[in-house]
Image (tube, coloured by chain):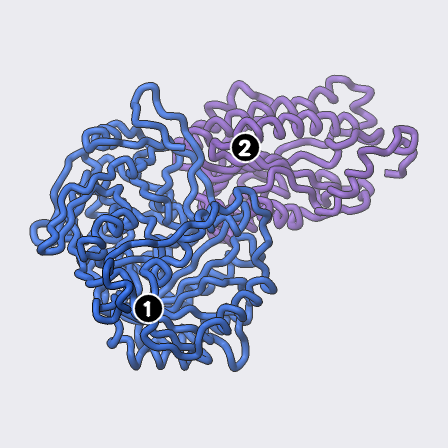
Amino acid sequence: MPVPFAADPPAEAISVTGWGRTAPSSARVLRPGTYEEAVRAVRECGGRGAIARGLGRAYGDAAQNAGGAVLDMTGLDRIHEIDAVNGLVVCDAGVSLHRLMQVLLPLGWFVPVSPGTRYVTVGGAIGADIHGKNHHTSGSFCRHVRAIELLTGDGETRLVTPEDEPDLFWATAGGMGLTGVVLAATVELLPVETSLMTVDTERATDLDDVMARLTADDHRYRYSVAWIDLLARGARTGRAVLTRGDHAPLDALPPRLRAEPLAFSPGARLPATPRFLPGGLLTRRSVGLFNEFWYRKAPREQRGRLRKLSSFFHPLDGLPDWNRIYGRGGFVQYQFVVGHGEEDALRRIVRRIGSRRCPSFLAVLKRFGDADPGWLSFPVPGWTLALDIPATLPGLAAFLDELDDEVAAAGGRVYLAKDARLRPDVLARMYPRLDAFRELRTRYDPRGAITSDLARRLGV
Amino acid sequence: MKDAFGAPQSLLILGGTSEIGLATARRLITRRTRTVFLAGRPCEQLEAAAESLRTIGALVTTVPFDALDPASHEVALGKVFTEGDVDMVLLAFGVLGDQARDEQDPLAAVHVTQVNYTGAVSAALVSAAALQAQGHGSLVVLSSVAAERPRRANFIYGSSKAGLDAFCQGLSDAMHGSGVHVMTVRPGFVHTRMTEGRPATPLASTPDEVAAAIELGLRRRSTTIWVPGTLRLVMAAVRHLPRPVFRRLPV
C-alpha cells in the first residue's frame, strides 16, 4: 500500500493495476501530503517519470507507471473554499466526488457531472474529462472547471484557466494526466433543492426502440441512460431499460421527507468482495440469467418515482471492490462512441457482440450531447456504448481489434480512461488532435517527466 | 507495454534461430509486436530469420549473443534494453546433445549443460534484472517435460533442463510483485530441426502449438505451462511411477 511520502530512503516499488486488474506493472508509489512534496516528487522523479493517480478507477493502465513514480494524490484532500452563494468550490485534486457530495449537498449544491461511481477524485475527473448521465444537457466535467492548479513536467506550478491558457487547459481536460499533475481545481456546482431524484423508468423491446425513445425525449430530462442487454438475440437484440430523471424539487417530496430534504445518505455498503474469487463466475449462462432478471425486474413504465441519489447514479458503489468478481484474470471495459448518422455501425456492433455471446452484464447506452473542447476528450455527439467483458474470454483481443476498426471507420473513438488494449496506430485515427497534444507535452515537459504505461503503450 | 491480454509490443528472443522462438514471434507479430530483437551467434540463419520476420511487418534487429560466454551477457543484452522497453524476453536457446556420445565424452556432456543451464541462468538473471528496472515485462523460459522426470534415453539433456526449470520456479517467486512475470514452458516432444530423425514420443507438438500455448499463458499470466496441456495430467501420474516401472516404459 502507499507509503507516507519520504524521498529517502526511496519508496519500495509495488505492483499497480487499474480497476480492470489486468497488466500489472511496478512503481514507487509516493503519497504527497503537500504541494511542495508533489513538486519535489516530479522534479526528482528520475528517468522513468511520474504520473498522478487518484482512486484507481481508470480501468486500464492510465495511472500506472512501470519502473517510475506514481503519485497517490489522495493525500492532498483539502477543500479550501466553498462559495455557497455562487456555487463554486476550490479543492485539492485528491478530494473525491463522494466527499464533495457529503459536504456540498447539505448546502444545496451538487457536483456538475457525476460518473457511475462517486469514488473518483477531482484530479481524475479532470484527467479523464469524465461524463455522466447528463452529458446531453451539461457536457463533460471540465466544462464546469473554472481553473486548474497544474504542476507541469518542468516542475513549475501554473494556474490554468480556459481564458488565459486555453491550449494547456483543454489539453489537460481529458489528457489522462499527461500534461502534468493537477494539484487543485475550482469547480462550478449545480444547485439542488433536495437530495432525491425523480426518476422515470421504461423498458424498450429492442435496439431501435431504445434509440427512438432516447432520441425523442432525452431533452426533457437532465439525466438519461439506458441499461442494455447485450446477450439478448433475435427480435430482442438490444432490449433495454431506460432510467431518466432529474433532481427532485422540494414540493415533490412527501411531508415526512421535507424536514431534511438535503440529507445525503448513500446507505450502508456491503462487505468488501472477497479478494481471491475464482475466475469464470461470469459465464454466458450466469450473466444471461442476471440480464433476464434485470430486464424483467424493471417496471414496463413508471413515472416520477423518488429515488436516492446513490441508487440512481452509483448503484455499484454499494458493493466495494466489485471488480474482484472477475477473478484474477481481470476484465476489460470497452466504451466507444459513434456519431449521429452512424446508427448502422452501432447496430452492427451490438449484433456482433450479441452473436459472439460476450458475457457482459453492465452494458450502458447513452446519447451524447455536443462535443467537448478537450483535445483528447472522449465525447462527441452520438451514441456511446460501454460494456465489461472478462479478459480471459477466448478470442477477445482480436474481436475488440475488429470493433476498433469498425468504430474508427465510422469516425468514432474509444474512451482512454477505459482502455487497456487499443492499437497505437488506431489512436491517431480516433483522436485527430493527438499531434497537437504531443507537441504541447514536449513544450511544457521537455525532459518527459510525466508519463504513464498508457502513454508508452499508445505512443501518446 | 503489454496490453490487457499480455500481448507484448517488443520482444527479445535469446536463441534467435529457434523454431519455437520464431513461431512465437510470428504469432505475436499478428497481435501487438512491432519490435523484435533476435539474439544469437552471428550467422546466415540468424539473418534469414530476421528477414522472414521483416516480411510480416516487424522491425527486426539482430544482436550478437553467445550462450557459452556468460561474461558477455550483461553488455550484449544491456544494449538491447537501452534502446527502449522490452516487454517480453523469450529464452529459447538450447541443445539436445547426443546422449549415447555424450555419455562417452564428458566434455560434450558439459557443453550441453553449459548451454542449457549455466548459459541460461546467466541470461535469465541479466534479463530479469533489466525487466525489474523497467518495472514490467515477461520472461518466458523454454524448459522441457524432460525436466520433470529424467529418462534413461536423454538424462543429460533432462538434467540440464531440470536445473533450469528449478531455477525458473525460484526466479518466478523472487520476481513476484515486482511487475515481472516469469513463465516456465514445458513442452513435450516438439517437431523441429533439433529433434529431426528422432522417434516422436506420444503427445508431440509443433512449434506453432507451443507458440499458441505461450500466447495463452501470457494472457493468463501463468507461471508454468505444459504443451500440450494434457501433459500436466500425464506427468502428474508419471512423476509417481515406481522406478522399476518407469525404467521399462517404452519412451
- Label 2 neighbour load within 10 Å: few <14, some 14-19, many 20+: some
Q: Chain of mark 1?
A: A
Which of the 4 image quarters holds residue A4?
top left
- Depth check, front residue: A366 or B2: A366
Q: Which amino acid is tagged 2?
A: Pro
Chain letter for purple, please: B
Residue neighbourhood size for the residue with mark 1, other residues' Cα within 10 Å, grouped as few (<14), some (14–19), many (≥20): some
Q: Secondary structure at mark 2?
A: loop
Viewer-nearest residue: A240 or B93: A240
Q: Would you place residue A417 above or below residue B199 in this image?
A: below
Q: Mark 2 or mark 1, which is nearer to you? A: 1
Distance (Cα) linking label 2 and label 1: 75 Å
For label 1, the residue is A306
Find residue A127 and report its horizontal and vertical position in percent: 27, 49
Q: Is residue B195 left or right of residue A242?
A: right
| Residue at 13% in and 55% down | A87
Q: Determine the residue positioned at 42% across, 53% down.
A: A318
Q: Specify the subunit that label 2 lies on.
A: B
Which residue is identified by label 2?
B42
Image colour for chain A is blue
Can you give x and y, in whole percent of width and height, for residue B209 in the image?
A: 66, 50
To the question of a shared chain for discs 2 and 1, the answer is no
